[in-house]
Image: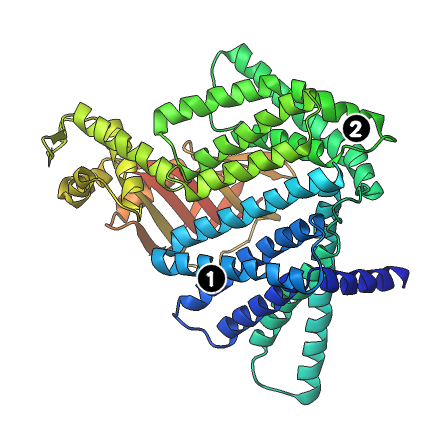
Amino acid sequence: MNIVLQLRRRSVDSIRRFTVPFIISLLLFADVAYLTCWPSDEKWLVYGAISLCIAAMFSVWWQLVLEVRRIRGAKAWLWQGASLVVWAGSYGTWMAVQDMTYIILYGSGIFLALTAGILAWLTYYAGESAFNRVFCGALQAVGVAVVADISLSICAMALQTLLQLSLSFSNLYALIFYASFLVVGWNVFLSSVPEPGRPAAPSKPFGSVMAYVVVPVYGVLLAILYIYIAMICFKGEMPVGKMNWFASIALLVYAFCYLTCSNYDNHVWLLRYRRWGGLLLIPVVAVQLWGVYIRHEAYGLTELRYLSMACTAFGIAVIPAALRRLSGTWLFLLAAGMTLVISITPLNVLDAPYRSQERRLLAMMEEKGMLQNGVVSDAADMSREDKEEIYSTYRYVKSYTGQRDPTVEVILQSPVMESLRYAGPHYRSRYFINDSTAVSVAGYTAMYVVEKTAGKDGMLTVQTQRGDVAISLLPYAEQLCRQYEGAGQMANQNVANLYLLPDDGHYLFIRTMNVDLADDAIQSISISAILLEK
């Protein structure tokens, strides 16, 4: 009960403190509710919702600025008019851009940069534990929102049953969800924002979780990464693409720990890890950068690879910051700046990878003699691997919705490029269905259900009471594919008496068989069958 009363008191105080952000959350709920109840193709409602999100986050930061400047009362309300200016500026920008992909990119980038800016401001004025309190408050807000959503949904279901309404309540459940998160959850989150000038105290349960759960699990992950590095050194080869994301997770977990675990004097090992743990990541980061370089040279830059590089760069910046015990303020400012760079500048996560792939496509086509003086020529004498690589890059460039180079436009309109799509293997499947639905079990004493997939060798092993039974599906599958050869990517065929006799003591009754082929070579065989044993 005390927890409920405490949440209620904090929520009331939050509404008084962050009145404008709370009003904006109500407007955002009204916008989303209108879109839910009366769906429309009109984009202005979507633009308005994205602009309200940005204005809400800006108004939080602006309120913190006013508190630092000790501006209160009617004067503070006048200054909060800046939030309206931000909303109008954002809305006008979206109306001018029109491209929804870029609107989402710009909007999310500005929103995240404002969030990082707020955390930098709070860290500077409320101490190093400010992010700790805000993060725990966010978790609490999500929990309260989920409870509110479930509770109100149960009430709505009970009301629907009581009144015996046949109308769909899907919109009502959606409105309950939005109200729970956009209004209730948002207000609970704002109640956790520390006041500038009052040092924030870290959460004790959070420190225990980090010290006794997260850091030990992180140590296991780090040990696995070190084993992986040892295997690379032992084998003398770099299997790129397998370690990158795990290394990024390890790096970001350390950055998160550094920014949230600054004042836990009762957890000595946690503080030591916070300062010196970055040194353990140096070999991992080195191997990760090597792998990213190899993939970049082989396949060029992509959105995911670009984001991975940005996250890695931020994680690397945390290591010297920890050694020098720098304030989290500078790291949050760095995060805000990097977010703006990869979202709203020409180096954004959409344009920068496209320009890289565009240059790569032009260079490959010129090298292979496919592009001369702006004219695309045939590529009949090229190897399959080169055709696949060029076509893959061409397909990436074609998916771009922004402004392209005139030479690239000529390439994209050439029918020669589409002819490259058939350079790779011709993938197709054959699906065989047994017409027979029954089989005689006379003379058999045991039955086993078989739901398995065999690889290229077509071998399956089924465990029975008498031992393992080896079954070779490849010859039978090849025979069926030759017998029922047909065009198309997928061909279904009913077959009478689909079965195999692995040996004298077993009968394999096949209900369905799926055969995956690349050109004419079988890649895998999946069966649903029953194995009878004498």
- Residue 95 is left or right of residue 214, and the answer is left
Q: Around disc 2, counting alpha carbons within 10 Å, would you say few (fewer than 14), some (14 to 19), or many (20 or more)?
A: many
Q: Is residue 326 left or right of residue 229?
A: right
Please tell me whether mark 2 sits on a helix, a strand or a loop.
helix
Which residue has dot 1 on it?
A: 88
Q: Residue at x 38, y 42 (%)?
A: 350
Q: Position of residue 467 (x, y in %)?
A: 62, 34
Few, some or many residues within 10 Å of mark 1 (<14, 14–19, 20+): some
Element at label 1? helix
The N terminus sits in image quarter: bottom right
Of all residues, the one furthest to the front in this rendering is 75
Q: Amino acid at mark 2?
A: Leu
Q: Where residue 389 is drawn, which disc sits there?
A: none
- Residue 298 vertical placement versus 62 (above, below): above
Task: Residue at 26%, 38% (x, y): give it.
Answer: 394
Q: How is the image coloured?
A: rainbow
Q: Amino acid at mark 1?
A: Ala
Image height check: is 391 above or below 90?
Answer: above
Asked whether 363 or 332 is in front, the reply is 332
**From the viewer's perspective, is the residue at label 1 or at label 2 nearer?**
1
Q: Is residue 145 visible?
A: no
Q: Mark 1 or mark 2, which has the lower sequence index? A: 1
Q: Which residue is mark 2?
A: 270
